[in-house]
Image (cartoon, rainbow, N blue to C red):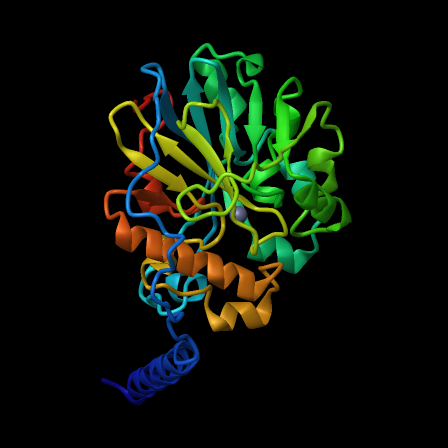
Amino acid sequence: MNTWTRRGLRWLAGTALVLGALATGISAMDAPLSVPPPGADLPHAWPAARIPSGLAFSVIPTSQSKGAFEALLVGGGSWLRYRHPAHVAVLVRHPQGNLLFDTGLGRQVDAQFAVNGFMDRQFFGYEQVKPAVDQLAQAGWTPDRIQRIVPSHMHWDHVSALPDFPDAEVWVNRTELDHARQGHAPAFLASQFKGVRHWHDLQFTPTPYMGYPQSLDLFGDGAVVLVPLSGHTAGQVGMFLTLPSGQRYFFTGDTTWTIEGLQKPADRSWALRQIVHVDHDVPANQAAIVRVHQLMQRFPDLKVVPAHDENVLKTLPHFPAFQG
Ligand SMILES: [Zn+2]
């Protein structure tokens, strides 16, 4: 080994040591969220439901994020795992009508995204775009077969495809819509929603559901029930889905980006939260994380799906396959 090789190796080892120490130091700022004993409002049994036999759902993967180390996406995550959060639409096929929960990235995403500055374009970069409307068309679904779109929230990566479904009713609560209209890039991109023709004011009823004080039973049969999940944005919503098989899902939007955040439970990493302002109301979002964690503890069969967790999403049926 010559002197230069030895010097090079020493330099590499030194750099690795410094990076390792830095990563350890940064991760030391991440502590799991504290979990109080569940209150009396957390139920012990599932609410009654009359699930129609034709109900089924399918995940439409529309793109993936260029990604980040897991340790940045979730407090306590690994610096050795590189994650590619997915951008998906969830298609719910119900005998009374079909809906999309979130849209993923749409046909116009490049033009929509172009208003972002250089740093945001790197930070929120995406790849492998396959808009839901095109995948539906390949399977013979015209866009008008989607009667409703329920965005979990109005961030750009959830409503990019609204222009691809001009006839759909878009169900958003007033708080979220105001938040989005007052918002700006990179979180909210007005070009995605200013042309919506059919807004529907999503209003919860004072009917408690699975520990949430309000809910909205979309078809009146208990199959698809929305609950308020604000914190990440002012009016984020979550979706409970109960299939004819009895399997239950809870789609939790961006309360966390990964299932690990709900399991630990942990917020997004401290380091990331120093760089970008991600959550509208941090304490409210942390309370939402803890509540989902408590639900998972009590109902181990409940399958919880954070909107971007590529590992959870790949276990679900992908369009054109459905699960009922
Ligand atoms: Zn998102």
Residue found 36% across the figure and 19% down from its top:
55
Q: Residue furthest front?
A: 40
Spot occupied by residue 250 in the image (x, y as percentages of width and height)? 38, 41
Spot occupied by residue 257 in the image (x, y as percentages of width and height)? 44, 53
The mark tally for this picture is: 0
Give residue 138's quadrant in the image. top left
Residue found 53% across the figure and 35% down from its top:
102
* Residue 243 can be seen, yes or no: yes
Can you say whether 149 is above or below 98 in the image?
below
Give residue 77's quadrant in the image. bottom left
Q: Nearer the viewer, residue 19 or 302?
A: 302
Residue 261 located left or right of residue 159: left
Q: Nearer the viewer, residue 320 or 1?
A: 320
Location of the C terminus by quadrant is: top left
Q: Nearer the viewer, residue 120 or 223?
A: 223
Can you say whether 257 is above or below 141 in the image?
below
* Residue 114 can be seen, yes or no: no
Location of the N terminus by quadrant is: bottom left
Spot occupied by residue 224 in the image (x, y as percentages of width and height)? 43, 29
Spot occupied by residue 84 in the image (x, y as percentages of width and height)? 41, 50
Residue found 32% across the figure and 58% down from its top:
263
